[in-house]
Amino acid sequence: MSKNNNMDSDNYPENQATTTTSRSSGGWRGWLHFQWVRTPIGLLKIGQFILILLGLIIMSTIGSVFGSGVSSLEFFMFIHTTIWVILLIVIILHTLNVYQKLPRLLTCNAVMMISCAVASVMLLICSATVMGKFDWHDTVLAAGSFGIMSMFLFIFETVYYFLKLRREGGFPQPATQTNMADQYQDPVAAEY
């Protein structure tokens, strides 16, 4: 029985100093970085993702609509779907820590600022159009309001990248491994 107690005590982290370092460098923790979600830009991206998805879900519950405003509904669905897919790709790239390995031209502050500004303008146009054409339809108004709210989140991100562009320039220095480790501090790994 003492042998079983001894084996159970070996499963605690304080008794496995040598095995925790080998586990933290491999496995799912080696390639998934959820620490990015805790950063301000990560929270902003998750908020944008949820608001765009809610707008798409609400707009998809509309039955048959006829008249001159059908093209504005299709435009709304196209813009929201496109932005939602791009957000999904960005979140996956950040979570897998592949985003920093993309060409610097794609991740530079100026390109990100312009992309967010274009997205916010497109969200404003498509949401305002459907809300103006279907001001009598509550479901369309709800979906359009989620588009307007997500537009404000994209404006916040545009301002963030503008300030970052002014502070760091168009092409900030690429992060080294130690800088990335400092940027995404893992509280679980720090305990061991």
Image (cartoon, helix red, strand yellow):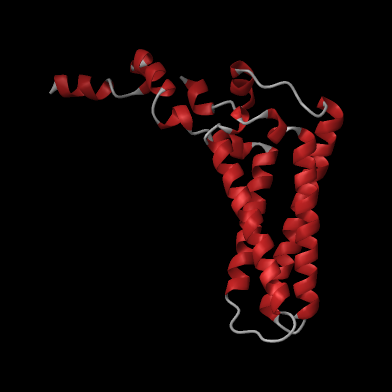
85 relative position to 113: left or right: left
* Residue 23 x, y percent position in the rendering: 38, 22
Q: Which quarter of the picture shows residue 89?
A: top right
Judged from this view, the residue extending furthest toward the top is 18
- Looking at the image, which residue is at 62% across and 29% down? 100
Q: Which quarter of the picture shows residue 137?
A: bottom right
* Residue 172 x, y percent position in the rendering: 76, 25
* Residue 177 x, y percent position in the rendering: 59, 18
* Residue 102 x, y percent position in the rendering: 62, 31
Q: Return the residue nearer the eye: 2 or 13.
A: 13
78 relative position to 186: left or right: right
- Looking at the image, which residue is at 77% across and 34% down? 109
Task: Residue 152: tell me if it is visible.
Answer: no
Q: Quadrant of the N terminus?
A: top left
Q: Quick check: 83 above or below 97?
A: below
Q: Quick check: 169 above or below 106?
A: above
- Looking at the image, which residue is at 67% across and 86% down? 66
- Looking at the image, which residue is at 55% across and 31% down? 97
